[in-house]
Image: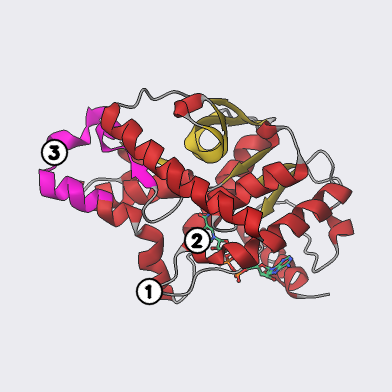
Amino acid sequence: MGLAEGKAQDMMQTAALLGFDTKIIGSTNDYAKTAGSNVVVITSGIPRKPGMTREELIGTNAGIVKNVCENILKHSPDAIIIVISNPMDTMTYLALTSTGLPKNRIFGMGGILDSARFKYQLSQHLGCSPADLNAVVVGGHGDTTMIPLLRFATWNSVPVIKFLGENQQKQIVADTMVGGATLTKLLGTSAWYAPGATGAALVEAIVRDEKRLFTCCVSLNGEYGQRDICLGVPVIIGKIGWEKIIDFDLNADEQAAFNKSADAVRSMNDVLKTL
Ligand SMILES: NC(=O)c1ccc[n+]([C@@H]2O[C@H](COP(=O)([O-])OP(=O)(O)OC[C@H]3O[C@@H](n4cnc5c(N)ncnc54)[C@H](O)[C@@H]3O)[C@@H](O)[C@H]2O)c1
């Protein structure tokens, strides 16, 4: 018995108050108890400390993620795997290439969280409810690699740029990109409520076959002009994992930013060859 068993009991003890009947079990160091899982979310690995980039975690987390994938598949060969461990784009690429699973069964959680952070920033500037906003971040899940697509963001169908001055627009994009780093500085470690909620939304979309449109880190084979890389693009999430990529028709500047993001992620992926 260990921490996971304790957390599971603590959560189960909210069932009578919150009115759910989901069975929650915890398992510390015993993958056998996860046997037959449909969906597995990997959060194993070290988080950032203040001042660290996600990229600095690669050496430690690559070994952990590879090992966790092997153990998951021993017990749950049909599982869909969602990678959260950072640097997430490279960890997703590693999980995909080291397991050889069909590409639709492995994807990374990043863009969906960054999009939620983008909506938070927009709501602060517009003085509106984040629930009325549509806004998407694509590209890598890094402070310098993510691309908040301001041109596509709407407030109940009205383009947000109509309401924002140029400086405000720049500020929103910049604050979105360092959304995670800002929290790491404030909290002393990685954030958890929003990452937890986004992970849960993805699992729910799979289990309920919801066909939600979220930005996730998936294997590209020519889409968005890239191949042999996992990067954040809008995808449909349903019972088979990620089902298809939606093309947002980026303009020349957005595509150039996407290509630059891919270059940065690709050079991180190259580090895997040296480990
Ligand atoms: N993709 C995202 O948007 C996002 C958001 C938040 C955090 N993260 C990343 O998720 C990871 C976890 O962050 P956290 O805040 O939950 O950290 P944490 O330290 O609270 O949890 C990490 C967990 O990994 C486990 N672990 C360590 N080594 C392991 C191994 N060899 N095998 C199995 N499990 C092992 C630890 O026991 C611990 O439970 C970090 O890499 C962090 O950067 C990603």
Residue 200 lies in the magenta stretch: no
**Which residues make up the magenta segment?**
146-173
As drawn, the label of residue 186 is 1
Q: Quadrant of residue 105?
A: top right
| SS under mark 2 | helix
**In this picture, is 176 found above or below 102?**
below
Residue 195 placement (x, y as % from top left):
51, 56
Tell me the kind of residue under disc 1.
Answer: Leu
Using the image as rendered, state which of residue 37 and residue 189 is in the foreground.
189
Residue at the image position 32 percent from the left and 51 percent from the top: 120
| SS under mark 3 | helix
**Of labels 3 and 2, the one closer to you:** 2
In this figure, which residue is indicated by the disc labeled 2?
A: 55
Q: Can residue 68 be seen at all in this image of the molecule?
A: yes
Left or right, residue 185 beside residue 152: right
**In this picture, is 5 found above or below 85?**
below
Tell me the kind of residue under disc 2.
Answer: Glu
* Disc 1/disc 2 C-alpha distance (Å): 20 Å
As drawn, the label of residue 174 is none
Left or right, residue 185 beside residue 112: left
| Crowd tier of the residue under label 2, counting other residues whose Cα lies within 10 Å: few below 14, some 14–19, many 20 or above | some
Residue 56 placement (x, y as % from top left):
51, 66
Which color scheme does this rendered protein use?
Answer: secondary structure
In this figure, which residue is indicated by the disc labeled 3?
A: 163
